[in-house]
Amino acid sequence: MLLNALMTLAEQANIDILERRDLPGRAARHQAVPVGLHSTLYTLLCQRYPQGLYAHQAEAITAILRGDDVCIATPTASGKSLVFMAAAAHVLKSRPATRILALYPAKALIQDQLGKWRELLGPLQLTPGYIDGSVPVARRADILENHALVLMTPDVAHAWLMSHLDQPAVRGFVQQLQLLILDETHVYDGVFGSNMAYLLRRLQAVAPLRCIVSSTATVGAPGEFLEQLTGRRPQVFGATDDGSASPAKTLLLGQVRGGNSFERIAALLRALTQANLCRFLAFGDSRKLVEQLVDAG
């Protein structure tokens, strides 16, 4: 019914549907929570996930427990964060003196993820700290001293952390740094990626890193990409390893009839909004185009 209504709205906006593809859904594949996890974390995860973890989550955590570097490159909403958060919780409960650094490419991402970290770590009596450009320099040493896990932006790691190794709090944190987490690694491309690669090599020269865990949803050849970024080759869990459920999907290929394609597409988006058939996302290939579409709506 929804699909028929969508096709009717497209026709009214003078958009012809040229082709349709129906993609089947996929049921979730579960595996038991890895028994090698610290007992309190194991119990917590068993309570929260009575059916078990997704297969790729359980396999990735098992690889981390072996000491392997891991890259989780499964699609969006497949539970990538749980893998590195569970790994961090295990390390902190098993080796309390260990320090963990989680790098996020933007401070907005840190704020977005803090709630997830607290939700998992809170019941384990663990609390994450964070340092981004908004945190006063005078407070940063205290954060390192009072938190075994710190979320940080690369610019702070470069401009402050690595340039203050002579400070006791910084030196103590780095000397106990054994797990590095890199989220949203697809952002590290071009000049930003080159600078990040240099930063990670400097960090590895002074920190006894046992394991690097990274996640991304949009990198082609993630193993090669992470090797260039970190100098280390991770075990990759990609789309073919994904154990999360996926609903059935229908793809429609449309073509605007006649001229003024922008106005036709804007008309379709307005019609979808007014019809209130469902929630939807509209993507543009540039910021300017998105702004024009918003103004046209």
Image (cartoon, helix red, strand yellow):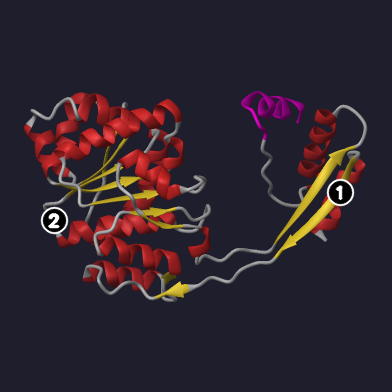
Q: Earlier in the sequence, mark 2 or mark 1?
A: 1
Q: Which residue is more in the foreground, 164 or 269?
A: 164
Local secondary structure at mark 1: strand
What kind of secondary structure does the magenta stretch mostly adopt?
helix
Q: Distance between the residues labelled 2 and 1?
A: 60 Å
Residue 132 appears anywhere in the view: no
Front-most of residues 82 and 219: 219
> The C terminus is located in which quarter?
top right
Q: Residue at x 53, y 70 (%)?
A: 28
| Residue 151 visible, this angle | yes
Q: Residue at x 52, y 62 (%)?
A: 240
Which quadrant holds residue 44?
Answer: bottom left
Q: Which residue is drawn at 22% across and 68% down?
A: 38
Residue 87 at what x, y percent from top left?
29, 58
What residue did someone put label 2 on? 96
Q: Horizontally, is 129 left or right of 296 in the view?
A: left
Q: Name the mark on residue 150.
A: none
The answer to whether residue 196 is above or below residue 182 is above
Residue bearing the label numbered 1: 18
* Residue type, label 2: Pro
Taking depth in this image into account, of 8 and 195 the one nearest to the observer is 195
* Residue 274 placement (x, y as % from top left): 80, 42
**How many neighbours does mark 2 have within 10 angstroms: few (below 14), some (14-19), or many (20 or more)?**
few
Q: Position of residue 127 (x, y in %)?
A: 24, 50
User: For the point 42% across and 35% down, which residue is it?
Assistant: 188
Q: Could you tell me residue 223's position as x and y percent?
A: 41, 50
Q: Give the range drawn in magenta.
A: 284-297
